[in-house]
Image: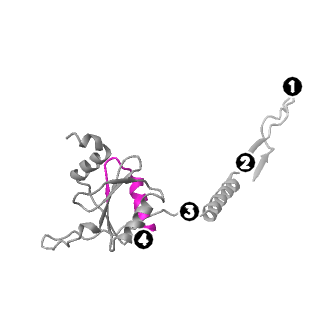
Amino acid sequence: MAEVNTGGGGGGKKKGGKVRAKKASTKIDMTPMVDLAFLLLTFFMLANTLSKPQTMEINMPEKPKPEDKIPEVNEKKVLSLALGENNKIYYYVGITDPEVLVTDYSDKGIRKVLREKKAEIPKLIVLIKPMEESKYQNVVDIFDEMTISAVPTYALVDISKQEIKMIEESKNPSENTNQ
């Protein structure tokens, strides 16, 4: 605790000298304050709940061997979602002469599209294709939408140059008619 020393130092009891008041030296023991600080720190660390990281489980398939046969899929069962800039999603069904439509991440946007296509197409397969302009948050949002809409089969794949060209043409239809 605190301690006051009264002995020694500047009394002035010599002959002919001035009489001066004794100066008391103080010494403060900091041990109890350090103990209290560590007790408080320990208490607040244990009493506070640490935030749990939010993770999304993604199961990746094994890389196919060259001798493995690639399963054939009917193109009319494949819904392709191209994640574009400004939180836009370009979607189309099939490969041959698809109609590219645009939606967003709202519940009246992609969620409605997924539910309609899931009801319309049995055994629907969704291909998620992020473009260079899309953000990481867009990929997380679309995975959340897959879970909410209960789409059983979906995959994250690279977008081809042909698909990028097809999306660009759908953005500017007036330029395509002049070619």
The 10 Å Cα crowd at callout 4, few under 14, some 14 to 19, many 20 or more, is few
Can you identify the residue that label 4 sits on? 150
How far apart marks 4 and 1 lie (CA) works out to: 102 Å
Colour mode of the rendering: one colour
Residue that mark 3 sits on: 50
Which mark is first along the chain, 3 or 1? 1
The amino acid pointed to by label 3 is: Leu
Q: Closer to the observer: label 4 or label 1?
A: 4
Tell me residue 19's x, y (percent): 87, 30
Mark 2 or mark 3, earlier in chain: 2
Amino acid carrying label 1: it is Gly
Residue with the mark numbered 2 = 28
- In the rendered image, residue 77, in percent from the top left (x then y), is placed at 29, 69
**Viewer-side label of 1, 2:** 2
Does the CB distance between marks 4 and 3 fall below 8 Å?
A: no
The disc at residue 16 is 1
- Quarter holding the C terminus? top left
